[in-house]
Image (cartoon, rainbow, N blue to C red):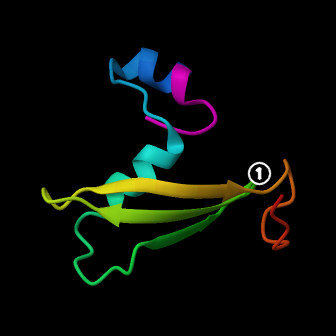
Amino acid sequence: MTGSGSKLAADKLGSGLVNEFKAIASACRPLAAMRGRSSRWGGESSKYLRLSRGEDGAFGIVDYSTNGDCAAGTGSFH
């Protein structure tokens, strides 16, 4: 589980928690043609990740950026 409310949901379902940036990088693994970048826009924030594919096919986070709270979709990164 990741994101807002994840601790409550994880406790009720007996699942684990993971950092949102790591979850995005893990979700990119099946995308073989991916160029090593990911953007995520949500209701509370926007994220940009620069990724590097390892020998095992998993992506590691090289660099990242996120905007301020409650400004998703504005294109504002600090």
Residue at x-position 85% and y-position 67% = 76
Per the rendered image, the range of residues in magenta is 1-7
Quadrant holding the C terminus: bottom right
Among all residues in the image, which is located at the extreme bottom? 33
Residue at x-position 34% and y-position 58% = 27
**Residue nearer the viewer, 62 or 8:** 62
Residue at x-position 43% and y-position 17% = 12
Query: Could you classify mark 1 by the number of other residues whose Cα lies within 10 Å: few (under 14), some (14-19), or many (20 or more)?
Result: few
Among all residues in the image, which is located at the extreme left? 56
Is 43 on the left-hand or right-hand side of 71?
left
* Percent of width and height locating residue 49: 54, 62
In magenta stretch: residue 4: yes
Quadrant in the rendering for residue 39: bottom right
Q: Is residue 53 above or below residue 14?
A: below
Is 29 on the left-hand or right-hand side of 39?
left
Asked which secondary structure carries label 1, the reply is loop
User: Which residue is identified by label 1?
Assistant: 44
Quadrant in the rendering for residue 4: top right
Q: Amino acid at mark 1?
A: Glu
Q: How many marks?
A: 1
Residue at x-position 47% and y-position 56% = 62
* Percent of width and height locating residue 16: 36, 24
Quadrant in the rendering for residue 56: bottom left
* Percent of width and height locating residue 59: 31, 58
